[in-house]
Amino acid sequence: MKKWLLFLGTLVAFSPIYSQKYFTKKGRIAFTSDAIFERIEAVTNQVVAVWDWEAGKFEFSVPIKSFSFKIALMQTHFNENYLESDLYPKAYFKGEIIDKTLIEPPNLYRIKIKGDLTIHGVTQDISNETIVEVSPERLKGETSFSIAVADYQIEIPWIVREKVAKVVDIVVNIDCEPLN
Amino acid sequence: MRFVFLLITIIPLLGRTQENLSLLSLLEEDETPVKVDAIFKTTRIINLPSIEQTSVGVLDIKISHRFGTLQQGAYDLFGLDNASIRIGAEYGIHPNLMIGLGRSGYEKTYDGYIKYKWLDQTNGKNAFPFSMGAFIGTSINTLKNDNWEFTDRASFVFQLLLARKFSNQLSLQLSPTVIHRNLVATSAEKNTVPAIGIGGRFKLSNRISLNVEYTPVFNNFIAERYVNSFSVGFDIETGGHVFQLHFTNAIAMMEKGYFTETYDTWNDGGVRFGFNIARVFNLKKPKLETY
């Protein structure tokens, strides 16, 4: 009997479901600023993400300088004038899962998330809904949302008001592996 | 036995209390050094070549004017009636290599150069304190003179570029320079002239910076009537343009000219208003994979 209890206890204690965490260092974020005269696109593949699926918590970080643009001068201006990446080298998101529904067994979930997005040293609340694929081997998901540039105290000078959009569309892609 | 059982169940629970800590701290920080970029706003500080490179596939057209000296007074509208012009073009071949061509009204001179950067200032672990590059150029004057062979018209410049961004605002550059003129006017002047270019910028806002440069030449290498050039000005950036507005005592816009043939002095009002306008064109658009 005691042997059985011990076995059961060990099973429960070390069951991966308790502490299953996932991570990636190669997540992807693309953003688009679609203004009247100019469409600006940028992408990075250096997004770091860590998920604690059971605890319903996750964090992202992305180096601002890792965003690459089609036009080199845009990248310089993005870092120098808008995001001020020397002062604010990274953007962060610290979020939690507030609702989780299994929509397609065994591993497709619809989740509602909320959290704090920090860009340019300014933190704002963000909430969103998305679908993630979760298995013991991976956690995979994509989401898109929009942010207002002004919310993060990023000034758009009057002279380029037709070239830089006030609202920027963001697409996030992650494909995480288990973290041991 | 019961104790072991307790221990086994409790240990993982202890682990769970640590989850209040940042999840990102579970990963090791990346230790790759980060390149320091935008040490200067454009490829010239004022006259001096800066450490900045034209990006790959980008053509940078530079139109520069130096007006007459301020001492000419209101009759010449403080020099604005007279202008010396240089039209130039620069092109980025490789992230570390660019070429440039120009034509100046000053002695009807054509100039060509390459600029190569082989070290980047970096931040982070194993940081490197400065960026390093070289500027190698030649200039040919095409004034009418039957006594000159083609080789007599040529001069050369070799510059080492050492630049450091001290802070988001302050960048400084040292450019040890050697200028070689194939032909000089008098025997008192040396063909090969060592000099040093000193330049800096201080950002007043994200789009405006104050630039200063000074180009002292070692004693007794150039004729006595020539002086060192000193320039002060502003970089104003508006989207695809950089406007550089400045005051300088140099009229020439190629190295051989402003280093060794500047004759106006600041003391006597021998200062000229001038500007460089840079406009970039993307000849090659690199593909960017987005959604």
Image (spheres, coloured by chain):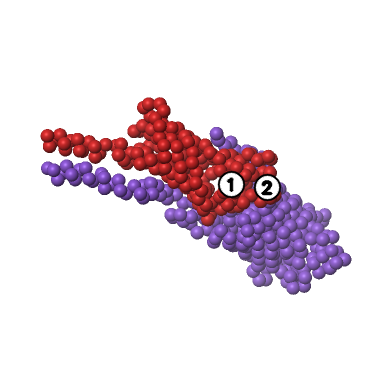
Residue beneath label 2, please? A160
Chain letter for the purple colouring in the rendering: B
In terms of secondary structure, where does tag 1 sit? helix
Query: Does residue B149 appear left or right of residue A120 in this picture?
Result: right
User: x, y (%) of residue A107?
Assistant: 38, 29
Q: Residue at x 72, y 59 (%)?
A: B245
* Viewer-side residue, B245 vs B146: B245
* Viewer-side residue, B109 vs B287: B287
Q: Is residue A157 above or below residue A144?
A: below
Residue B153: quarter of image: bottom right
Q: Residue at x 73, y 68 (%)?
A: B226
Residue A166: quarter of image: top right
* Count of all numbered marks drawn on residues in the image: 2
Q: Residues within 10 Å of mark 2 (few under 14, many from 20)?
A: some
Report whether residue B94 is seen. Answer: no
Inspect the image, locate mark 2, and give the three-letter code of the amino acid beneath it. Answer: Val
User: x, y (%) of residue A20?
Assistant: 33, 39
Q: Residue at x 49, y 38 (%)?
A: A128
User: x, y (%) of residue B177?
Assistant: 62, 61
In terms of secondary structure, where does tag 2 sit? helix
Residue beneath label 1, please? A149
Report whether residue A56 is seen. Answer: yes
